[in-house]
Image (cartoon, grey):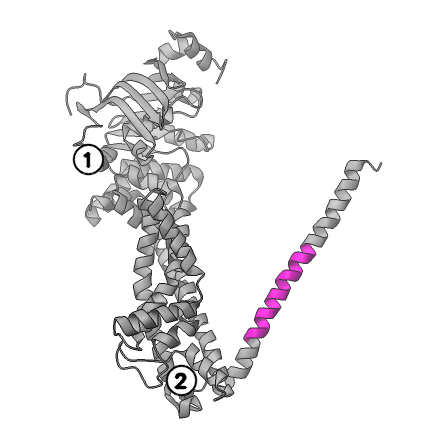
Amino acid sequence: MGDISQPKFEIRDLKAYYSDREVIHGINLEINKNEILSLIGPANSGITTLLRTLNRLCDLNPESRQEGEVVLDGKNIFDHDIVVTQLRRRVGMVFDVPTPLPLSIFDNVAYGLKIIKMSKADTANQVEQALRMSALWEEVKDRLSTPGMSLSGGQQQRLCMARVLALEPEVVLLDRPCSGLDPISTARIEESLMEIKEKYTIVIAPHNVQQAARISDRVGFMLLGDLIEVDTKELIFSDPRDQRTSDYVTGRFG
Amino acid sequence: METPIKKMNTTSKANERIAIAVIWAAAIFVLALLVSIIVHILFNGLPYITWEFLTQIPRNMGRDGGVSSTIVGTFLITIVAIAIALPMGIGTAFYLAEYTRENIVTKIIRFSAESLAGIPSIVYGLFGFIFFVISLDLGWSILSGGLTLALMILPTIIRTSEEAIRAVPVVFREVSYSLGATKFQTIFKAVFPSAMRGIVNGTILSIGRCVAETAAVILTAGSALRMPSSLSSPTRTMAVHFYILAREGISMENAYGTAALIMIIIFLINIVANTIVNRFIAKSR
């Protein structure tokens, strides 16, 4: 795993493009192990693009292109010998809308495990662990074979989290995971994030500034493709260096 | 007080009523038409569908005996056609929807498929006769007929499958990739099950066309009445049998019986296929 001082991710001068449009203008950012890093900013800040770059999901868009380096545990993820499917297992992603596949609850969580051909007994065990970690096990343990889509929105999003956690990733990316959820479901997800950060590194685009204040260790503020500043949440919310950060977190724009 | 806005509201209410009436009338008219055709054929045909009719081969050109050999012929030709067209069609549909971006090749494939869908079946029959029956020397046979029908239904299968695949939400693919799946795993495990319903609908439509086809079959599979012994035997399908019985005035009774039987079989195929798909989907969800 390397020593504790080495960051999990080192992003060096990252630029991202969609066809000819530059949407991220050279970002430098270090993401530490076992921290919750929130990336806040208004729409079009490049946060989603940045998250999708970290597990190379942006590759799915043939128009997208990146320059610079994203180093995960000392290895640039844009290197040619990187196996993208392995990278995505190490860096999991929870999307902004709950997206259960049209499969049973069990099969949704087991989806990634079946791909790596885990044995049935191990899979069952892993599915249970993942559902417990995302605080869904007690609610679904008696109906694992019912459709994932039959769950409520908040349960579906926890299902999606379980699906990622089942693969025991090293980093979990969450792109506004609570945007459509009620406060109780949101609180559940935040609680499980606080618990699992012991084991994982978490990068989240929270759906509002208050969420960032509740759960983060550090907060980064992005605006129109630039990372304006990144610091501990105490400093970002009480004494930011940049006027724009201050204006955003106090709600003067956004 | 009667303001212009309020007047507008009353007229739009009246329009709404007229629109609803027109839509209902159209629906009822179509329904009545379909029901009357079905009732007419079943009323005239059902009395002749007996155990003997189903199990005996036709005698006296079809005047006597049953239709057993034509049932077997129909099933075999349809199975050959589907067995060839389904994998090819679904493969092409996945190629078009998942493996290429719009370019000259996809345009040519799509344009050809759409043109082929509009060609009268007798033209397929003529092509099948010249190519399969004569050039490839397959003779009038179940194989020639099945291959010709496969060509005929291919455009339908490609188009319905492609539409079904494209209708699968992009997020399903993204989720699958984000969990470490390869492209093939994504297509096989996340896209295909979701597209299944549409693909099956296209297949059922195609089976119906195979069972009902006459022109293309009569030129490629012949019209022999004996029981086929292999895929290289000539045969007569139920639709062709019906056509010959009615056209040559051999037996209107048996023609109606055959027509009713075709309808019932297509109906049963629909029910069976839907049941299987529903089972599959219920299981996978």
The answer to which image quadrant residue B134 occupies is bottom left
**Residue B148 colored in magenta in the image:** no
> Which of labels 2 and 1 is toward the front?
2
**Stretch of the chain drawn in magenta:** B20-38
Helix, strand or loop at disc 2?
loop
Task: Using residue B120 as the reference point, say whether residue B148 is left or right of it.
Answer: left
Q: Which residue is mark 1?
A: A83
Q: Is residue A104 visible?
A: no
- State the residue lying farthest toward the right: B1
Q: Which residue is mark 2?
A: B67
Towards the viewer: A60 or B245: B245
Q: Report the disc number at residue A212.
A: none
The answer to which image quadrant residue B213 occupies is bottom left
Identified by mark 2, the residue type is Val
Residue B241 point in image, percent of width and height: 42, 81
Q: Quadrant of the N terminus of chain B?
A: top right
Q: Residue under mark 2: which chain is it in? A: B
Q: Residue under mark 1: which chain is it in? A: A
Residue B60 point in image, percent of width and height: 41, 93
**Residue B31 colored in magenta in the image:** yes
Q: Main SS of the magenta segment?
A: helix
Towards the viewer: B245 or A144: B245
Q: Are marks 2 and 1 in contact (CB under 8 Å)?
A: no
